[in-house]
Amino acid sequence: MLGVANGVRGASRLRAARRAAVGAGALLLGACALVQQNYTAEVERTLQQAAAERDALRVELSRREAAERAREAVFQAYVASTQRHAQSENARLIAGLFDIGLDPAEAIVAVTEPQAAAGGIDRNLGLEADGYAGAADVDANEIFGGEGSFASAANEIQGDFGGETLPASEGTDSVLGLNNDLRAFVAAIPAVVPVREAHVTSGFGVRRHPISRRLGAHEGTDFVSVTDRSVIAAGDGVVRFAGRSGGYGKLVIVEHPLGFETHYAHLARIDVVPGQAVAAAEPLGVMGNTGYSTGVHLHFELRFRGRPLDPDKAFAMANPSAEIHRLR
């Protein structure tokens, strides 16, 4: 009987142990399920966050691409606009140069090869370093009447591109380069009116000579002034000739960079000597009535490599603010 009782108690303990094991297993399974549920939720949150960040990045990239396309469109529009303006001004400047009397071939050589030989006219001026190159440096910073510039506009747009060098087509470079050269060439024209408070009595071109009464070419402009008879240099240069010269009477010839020359004739007095460097607006002498002349005046000639140019049109082109009156 004792053995039977012991067996019953053992079986009872075994069943209790089994129930405890089953309960512990259930708890463990429950804990595992909870852990898995929490892990799944965390994974889902992480995936949702990653998806949201990916979508935000796509939106930002799309916005940046749109902004980049907009900046590129603005830049291309700027390039096209400046090229159109430059082409238009190039045509106007070239027409103006031809209008003042430049030969087309000479103009092309002068603009594209400013340092080309000038037939000895530029010899020993000592002004080349500050002549054409200096004019180009100044003129490149001006555009269309000095209101803004290619360079400043390019710098503003360049800032929008993070300071990187902006691309430009070869065609644009050539158009703007020609514009720069043309402006520099025009800036090199000696264009200071040689008489203060000037009045024109006879212009450039065909006229009837006041003494011989024959029709002929008048290769300069005649000026008078009732207040100041001083004659001043039309631009920086070097005096090549100062003395008497036939019908010109007392004459001063000044050489300027690029092959320009200015002649000042019929002077009453000469105040400079050959080889003397003169600055624009520096006195050269006093107008007079020497040589083949009918009265006190200045006969002024502007020449380019020996070719006479129209001073009135040259002044209007290179020095639009010059005040010149015409006697009726």
Image (cartoon, rainbow, N blue to C red):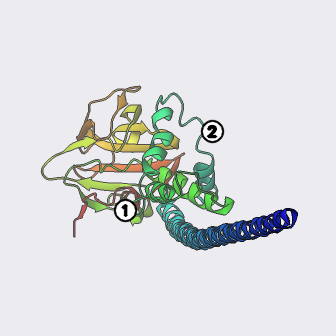
Q: Residue at x 72, y 71 (%)?
A: 26
Q: Which amino acid does label 1 sit on?
A: Gly
What secondary structure is found at the residue carrying circle 2?
loop
The C terminus sits in image quarter: bottom left
Q: Relative to residue 13, is residue 123 depicted above or below?
A: above
Q: Mark 2 points at which residue?
A: 117
Q: Residue 145 carries which label?
A: 1
Q: Nearer the viewer, residue 325 or 11?
A: 11
Q: Residue 84 carries which label?
A: none
Q: Relative to residue 1, is residue 275 depicted above or below?
A: above
What secondary structure is found at the residue carrying circle 1?
loop
Q: Relative to residue 316, is residue 84 depicted above or below?
A: below
For marks 2 and 1, the one nearer the N-term is 2
Q: How crowded is mark 1: few (under 14 residues within 10 Å), some or many (20 or more)?
A: few
Please state if 81 lies on the left or on the right of 172 as rendered.
left
Q: Which of 73 and 276 is in front in this view?
A: 73
Of discs 2 and 1, which sits in the foreground? Answer: 1
The N terminus sits in image quarter: bottom right
Contact between marks 2 and 1 (CB within 8 A): the answer is: no
Q: Relative to residue 125, is residue 72 depicted above or below?
A: below
